[in-house]
């Protein structure tokens, strides 16, 4: 049963990846997200490029996505080459009705947010299991933290009501591509006021970035049992 569900979810990921790829036009500079859903977009974009689409350039939000993009024929530059993107497509861990997001289960939240902040239009793609009425009910909020003095940051996060798990990779502490660590923060009952919480989190010295993407996605493409739908903010 679980396997059938996984196959179904994979199909939904492919559907949203392909739908987002149809939105790419000749001459665009495109941001490539991270994670299994964003990878479906990268595959679909690669197919469109093989069929003759000519984008002006692409920027990836992680090494993983960069490697995949190159392997499917997308030429990838860094954000210092293109400081303004036309379109960014990425997945999410949670999407609320106002298209506020939790991202970062893959650990790429800082680069994802930098790329998202450089883009004119951000389409979040997800299967319907990612839709929530309130953020923080299914996934923790990842908070990327400088390792120096991390115990102090941890105390301050706990004072905001967070139950914290340090992100691990097997037996060792996970280190981001920016040489930081991640505290996964759970708030009992979810997050009632995401903007307020995000402001408090950013006020803690040592916090580099949070996985709350509150004013970023303009559009969502969601696939589920009812088909593929597009939501706008
Ligand atoms: C990585 C992310 C991913 O986009 C998010 O975790 C969703 O991943 P997936 O599509 O594999 O469920 O934010 O940092």
Image (cartoon, rainbow, N blue to C red):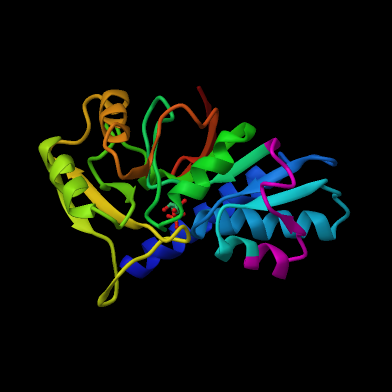
Q: Is residue 122 in the magenta section? A: no
Task: Give the residue displayed 71% in from the left and 70% down from the top.
Answer: 71
Total count of labels: 0
Residue 3 seen by the camera: yes
User: Left or right of 15: which side holds 173?
Assistant: left
Nearer to us in this view, 93 or 141: 141
User: Left or right of 229: which side holds 183?
Assistant: left
Image coordinates for residue 22, horizontal then vertical, percent: 72, 43
Nearer to us in this view, 159 or 43: 159
Task: Give the residue displayed 49% in from the left and 58% down from the top.
Answer: 35
Nearer to us in this view, 97 or 59: 59
Image coordinates for residue 200, horizontal then vertical, percent: 25, 29
User: Left or right of 63: which side holds 171?
Assistant: left
Residue 91 seen by the camera: no
Q: Is residue 77 in the magenta section? A: yes
Task: Give the residue displayed 63% in from the left and 34% down from the top.
Answer: 119
Image coordinates for residue 217, horizontal then vertical, percent: 51, 32
Which quadrant does the N terminus fall into?
A: bottom left
The residue sitting at the front extreme is 148
Which image quarter: residue 87?
A: top right
Question: Magenta stretch?
Answer: 67-86
Task: Give the residue displayed 60% in from the left and 50% down from the top.
Answer: 17
Which image quarter: residue 167?
A: bottom left
């Amino acid at each position: 049963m679980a396997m059938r569900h996984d196959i179904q979810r994979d199909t939904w990921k492919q559907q949203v990846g392909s739908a987002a790829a149809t939105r790419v036009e000749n001459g665009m500079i495109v941001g490539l997200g991270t994670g299994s859903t964003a990878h479906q977009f990268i595959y679909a974009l690669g197919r469109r490029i093989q069929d003759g689409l000519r984008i002006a350039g692409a920027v990836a939000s992680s090494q993983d996505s960069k490697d995949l993009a190159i392997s499917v024929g997308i030429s990838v530059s860094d954000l210092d080459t293109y400081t303004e993107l036309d379109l960014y497509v990425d997945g999410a861990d949670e999407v609320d009705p106002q298209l506020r997001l939790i991202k970062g289960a893959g650990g790429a939240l800082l680069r994802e947010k930098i790329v998202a902040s450089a883009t004119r239009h951000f389409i979040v793609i997800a299967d319907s299991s990612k839709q929530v009425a309130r953020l923080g009910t299914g996934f923790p909020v990842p908070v990327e933290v400088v390792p120096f003095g991390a115990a102090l940051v941890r105390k301050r996060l706990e004072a905001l009501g967070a139950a914290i798990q340090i992100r691990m990779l097997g037996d060792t502490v996970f280190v981001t591509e920016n040489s930081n660590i991640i505290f996964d923060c759970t708030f009992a009952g979810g997050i009632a006021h995401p903007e307020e919480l995000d402001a408090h989190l950013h006020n803690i010295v040592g916090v580099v970035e949070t996985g709350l993407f509150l004013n970023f996605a303009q559009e969502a493409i969601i696939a589920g049992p009812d088909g593929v739908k597009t939501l706008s903010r």
